[in-house]
Amino acid sequence: MRLGLVHPYWQTGCRHNPCEKDFTMKRSGEPKSEIAQRKKIEERLLKSEVALQNAFDEIKKSEAKLRRVIDTIPTLAWCNLADGPNEFLSRRWHEYTGLSPEESHGWGWQVAFHPDDLPALMKTWQELLVSGEPGEIEARLRRHDGIYRWFLIRVEPFRDDNGKIDRWYGTSTDIEDRKQAEQALQSSQRNLSSIINTMPTFAWSARPDGSADFLNDRWLEYAGLSATQALDWKWLTAIHPDDLNHLTDYWRSIMVTGEPGEIEVRIRRFDGEYRWFLIRANAVRDESGAILKWYGTNTDIDDRKRAEARGEEAYLRLAEAQRLSKTGSFITDLLADNHDWSEEAFRIFEFDPSTKVTVQMIRDIVHPEDLPTFDAVIARGMSGTDVDFVFRIVLPRGVVKHIRGMARVMVQVGGHPLFIGALQDVTESKAAEAALDRARSELSHVARVSTLNTLTASIAHEINQPLSGIITNAGTCLRMLSGDPPNIDGARETARRTLRDGNRASDVISRLRTLYSRKEFTLEPLDLNEAIREVIALSLSDLQRNRVVMRTELAENLPSIIGDRIQLQQVTLNLFRNASEAMIDVEDRPRQLLIRTAREADDRVRLSVQDAGIGVNPEDLGKLFEAFYSTKMGGMGIGLSVCRSIIERHHGRLWAEPNDGPGLTFSFSIPCGLESPSSTMPM
Ligand code: ADP
């Protein structure tokens, strides 16, 4: 093998040294001086030859050294002939590929390259051979164990004095590790870029002055802008005009301080709609602390913003509703004495909203008479039971408030029941209720008294005459009988008159009812259901007091009737009261009262009041409507008879019937179209 790395001059020129032959040619027939001269020259030549030989040896030595160097440097070196085939490959090349010099000589080295890379490699090599330029290419070279590694192949032409390419010198450097690192970097860059562009948020970066140098795909797609339309400062065009000044001021301020920043602004979508975004920015600095870049994200918070707005509005509405209804709400952990009160709760108790409420604070203002109830409620609550409560508080300014409320166990936290509850200031409704109670009892008193007064006056007036007739006639009769002889005819006559007056007195009662019910009607079209609802409202607390459970089945689309509202309401009230009184001693069953209205076939409407009271004996059923029939202590026995006369005035019917179970049902039925009140009453 020729050592191609050493210049050919050194290989060939010194082997055919022409000097030696020339000097030995002129040795015979010369004068002495010439001989001496020539000797000198020969000596000098000999010296030069020795020097040359030494130089040649030196060169050989340095060639061997160079070769050692070439074989030792941690790269593969080689030399190709001017037209391409290989002339020399370094020892490392052979060691790496496992190919012998014979196998790789000429074009044999090609087998060591990856078949996929060889075409490109040969193409480049051909181009370099034509152009004569230095070049480089990357290709995979097979190791002796069959594994391919990437190499960077660099080649330089070596030209002779005429500029003609004499050899190509090259190196092949193992770049596998770098290549792998590059590939890893590329794939992580690809990854990063796909993350940046697909993550559901906008990502961007900006220069130290705040102008954008990158906006991710999502950002651009959302705004419907191209990168050119949005980079630098052009992204500001997508900001809502109302937020622009605020944003730019803020942006500039953090550019100066370099502090991380966040701000909420509206950004225009491609379709023109604005949505709220949270913009966050962070600066990256170099070692000296100077800002290199800003990185940031924009997160869509529009839904959260809207929910917040709705929540705020709902809270305001709730607060307003609480204020209007004087209802406060609370969440309480009684055991820990932790209480979270709404504004209205504070307002009702007139506590300073900044104070921490405690049970003792509340207890301190509870009305002394209600303390036992209050303590019992707290004790029940402490045991984890739902509670309803009613108590009064006495405020420092002397005002008494009635509080009603309830608390329900919402959840157990750390073994403590957590209550949610509501409390209401019912002072006004309590006052109204009391006033209503008073009015009702006054009304019923007045009704009774006026009924009684009217009746008494009528009785006094109407009965006086027949009574005095009876007394006069009885006296006359006695006188006639005690005569001597007794005046039998006269006595008979007076007795007859007494009888007549007695009959007349009995008639008086009947006529009294007629008279009583003959007062003027106030007729008006009315909705019976509505009139009844008013009576129900009026009777409710009475019924509740008597623990009567009322149920209503009021028919829909009941035709309106023409009648006297007050009188019909009086009838209804009377029926309610009787039913409630009939159930007062009932303990073994619910005290149920069922109020029903219905439309009847022949254009009539009916009201039924069904109780679960003591009822009546069947033989007494007919007596209920008789005047002065009463089974109650202090009862007057007028109510039902007056009711019947009122209903009959409406051309209607009032009756009672026993239930299948306990109790009675009283019903009245009246025609819808009443033309004129009846002027007479059947008795
Ligand atoms: P008072 O209620 O003053 O007794 P009423 O004329 O209203 O006068 O009632 C007459 C009587 O009819 C009552 O005393 C009672 O015996 C009986 N009565 C009325 N309603 C009922 C009823 N729902 N259940 C049982 N008995 C009743």
Image (tube, rainbow, N blue to C red):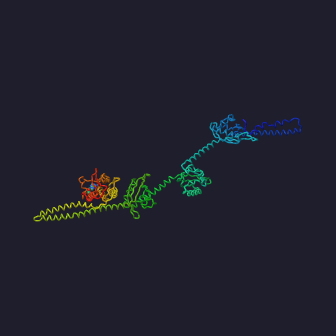
Residue 35 % position (x, y) = 87, 38
User: Residue shown at 39%/63% (left/top)?
Assistant: 399
User: Does 40 sit left or right of 269 as displayed?
Assistant: right
Residue 263 % position (x, y) = 54, 55
Outermost residue on the right side: it is 31
Outermost residue on the top side: it is 102
User: Which residue is more in the foreground, 571 or 109?
Assistant: 571
Please count the marks in the image: 0
Outermost residue on the front side: it is 675
User: Which residue is more in the foreground, 35 or 219?
Assistant: 219
Whereabouts is ligand 1, in terms of quadrant? Answer: bottom left
Q: Quadrant of residue 532?
A: bottom left
User: Can residue 541 be seen at all in this image of the molecule?
Assistant: no
Q: Quadrant of residue 168?
A: top right
Q: Quadrant of the N terminus?
A: top right
User: Can residue 232 be seen at all in this image of the molecule?
Assistant: yes
Residue 419 % position (x, y) = 42, 54
User: Which residue is more in the foreground, 160 or 561?
Assistant: 561
Residue 655 % position (x, y) = 27, 54
Q: Quadrant of the C terminus?
A: bottom left
Q: Quadrant of residue 593?
A: bottom left
